[in-house]
Image (spheres, helix red, strand yellow):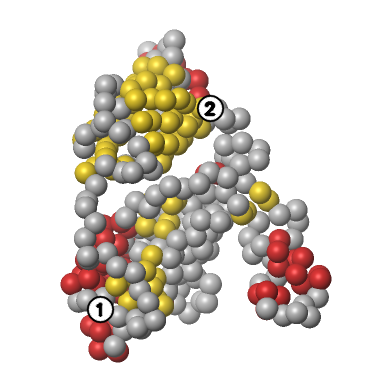
Amino acid sequence: MKKLTLLIAACVTIIGSSYAQNIDRVEPLFWWTGMKNPELQLMIYGENIAKYRPSISSEDVVMKSYVTLESSNYMLIYLDISKAQPGTFDIVFQNEDKKFTYSYELKQRKASTNDIQGYDSSDVLYLVMPDRFANGDPSNDQIKMGAEYQVDRSKFGARHGGDLKGIEDHLDYFVDLGVTAIWLNPVLENDARGGSYHGYFATDMYHVDRRLGGNEDYCRMIQKAHDKGLRVVMDIIFNHIGGNHPWVLDPPAKDWINKSPSRRGNHQKTIFYDNYASKYDSDVMNIQVFRWISIRQILTSLVI
Ligand SMILES: [Ca+2]
């Protein structure tokens, strides 16, 4: 009897999983009303999402079109939100077997204020590598990520545990130095083998790495910096992504990303201003530093 019960349970699980549908990502995570360009492109990522037909629950949000790609795990939805109000609306996905919804948020766009300023030659800009500056929250040093990594201050390539709380705790250090703006190395998630302490192997363009404190710590640190009269420069890289980004592991289409044929760049940046640089060095440098460059989709926003 026990075996029969287990068998039935297993069958139910199998049947259930064959209809299970998860949306792993929707990018951008949210958007704003009141933007000059009323068009919004959403990228939906989930197993076999292309086998569903999307529709929108709100009359104020108009679905202009949707596009499926070579991979059935992606869908692009194009919306006109010119008449939309701040709040949430449901995206309804339906096929012959199943129907489910995803709630998407439109926030109120904040009016521009004089608080938002650029920087110029009068500024003193201090470059900070967050993993190496100060460890303000040891609880985020070693957390579960998709890829294995080390935390060891004795090893150059490992992560050292520094984070945004550590920067927040030492803002007076910058003020006392006469610094007027801090520039952080890229803080977006780098879920890469080895940990990618430098931040240049992004695996998520909308989330600050949780080992640095995540989006919440990032926003709080910026507010605290502004309170002390410090500006913050966000360093964000759009021309390449890390090898563990979903677009690399599960490409939307074969031509989504340009891959260099076989070699890495040589970091010989002097070729750009050396009239006598060798053709070999120029060719290898121009391959680019990383294998994955020139992302076809243009990212239209930053989340923070
Ligand atoms: Ca830490």
Q: Is residue 260 above or below residue 142?
A: above
Which residue is the extreme one toward the front?
Answer: 36
Q: Residues within 10 Å of mark 2 (few under 14, many from 20)?
A: some
Q: Does the residue labelled 2 lie within 8 Å of ligand 1?
A: no
Which residue occupies 43% across, 31% down?
Answer: 78
Give the image quarter of residue 276.
Answer: bottom right
Q: Can residue 192 be seen in this view?
A: no
In the image, is residue 282 above or below residue 80? Answer: below
The residue sitting at the top extreme is: 96
Quadrant assignment for the N terminus: top left
Amino acid marked by disc 1: Leu
The reply to whether the C-beta atoms of the residues labelled 2 and 1 are less than 8 Å apart is: no
Tell me which numbered mark, 2 or 1, is placed earlier along the sequence.
2
Q: How far apart are marks 2 and 1 (CA)?
A: 47 Å
Q: Which amino acid does label 2 sit on?
A: Thr
Q: Can the viewer see residue 222?
A: yes
Q: Indicate whether 65 appears above or below 181.
A: above
Secondary structure beneath disc 1? Answer: helix
On whether ligand 1 comes within 8 Å of the CB at mark 1, the answer is: no
Residue 226 x, y percent position in the rendering = 22, 71
Q: What residue is shown with label 2? A: 68
Which disc number belongs to residue 114? none
Horizontal and vertical percent position of residue 79: 38, 30
Query: x, y percentage for residue 294?
Result: 60, 52
Report which residue position mark 1 lands on: 171
Q: Give residue 31's position: percent from left, percent from top.
A: 31, 42
Q: In which quarter of the image is residue 185?
A: bottom left
Closer mark to the observer between disc 2 and disc 1: 2
- Nearest the viewer among 63 and 235 is 63
Residue 136, picture quadrant: bottom left
